[in-house]
Amino acid sequence: MSITRRQITSAALAAIPLAFAANGTAQASGNRIRTIYIAGDSTAAQKYADAAPETGWGMALPFFLHKDRPVANHAVNGRSSKSFVDEGRLDTILGLIQPGDFLLVQFAHNDEKSADPTRYTEPWTTYQDYLRLYIDGARARGARPVLATSVERRKFDADGNAVPTHGDYPAAMRALAEEERVALLDIQALSLALWQKLGVEETKTYFNWTATEQDNTHFNPPGAIAVARLVAQELLRTRVLCPRDVRRLDEEIPVSWITWPEATA
């Protein structure tokens, strides 16, 4: 499947709120609470009691933001940029997002699964096409899109070097962000550097390694907190947020702050 830019733009413009369309612009009040919506996969998603200690970085991001920058975490396990759209999850966000809000988008882990046509996208074509849906949809509603390259898995070569695992997807997202003039949080590069610094053994304490599971993709509380800190630092560096929006960037965050609620029916 290949989506044309005209189809993407038409779909986005058709859904512009009437007030926005009438005025041509949307001004966000500086005093209004501005929500950060997350569209992403299992590495960011909210986890529940039956999954503990697995932790998505979106669960820890609020610890680094002030209360007038709340997080609405819509990331879901197993989704790609394509399946998230096809299941109507982007439409749900776009029905809620308000002028001045932010849409933070992180996909690639499941876009890579070429054997699954419901999720697979090709980096330089359909992956970018689907990401444009998020960009155009947010902009049409007066919200600000933000792209984040996917956090890296824990993988090392025989010499102890952290190895990238996302192929061309980070490069494709970087190129799209430059083309569309969208803020880019380069979490792939930063997380890879962090895993290299920590090394083969210490990184195990950041991922969901338990007595029964050796998971090199998903995080435990320390890992989720570490990645959320990278996200918050990047939001500040790219001037998506300003210094008064963030907090605790250099402070230790107790892992006891992470909680896993019971799943609701």
Image: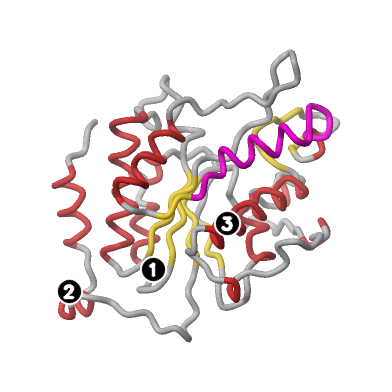
The CA distance from mark 2 to mark 3 is: 38 Å
Q: Which residue is mark 3?
A: 265
Hey, what amino acid is under mark 2?
A: Ala
Q: Which residues are magenta?
A: 185-203
Give how far across and how far down residue 174 sits, in percent.
Answer: 41, 41
Is label 2 in contact with label 3 (beta carbons under 8 Å)?
no
Image quadrant assignment for residue 193: top right
Residue 184 is left or right of residue 178, and the answer is right
Residue on which disc 1 sits: 96
Disc 1 residue type? Leu
108 with respect to 3 (left or right)? right
Q: Nearer the viewer, mark 2 or mark 3?
A: 2
Q: Residue furthest top?
A: 158
Q: Specify the quadrant of the image occupied by residue 12.
A: bottom left
Instruction: Check the image and report above or below for 222 versus 17.
Output: above
Mark 1 surroundings within 10 Å by alpha-carbon count, few (fewer than 14), some (14 through 19), many (20 or more): few
Q: Residue at x 40, y 40 (%)?
A: 173
The residue where tag 2 is placed is 21
Question: How many C-alpha atoms fall within 10 Å of the one at disc 2: few (<14), some, or many (≥20)?
Answer: some
**Magenta stretch mostly in which secondary structure?**
helix
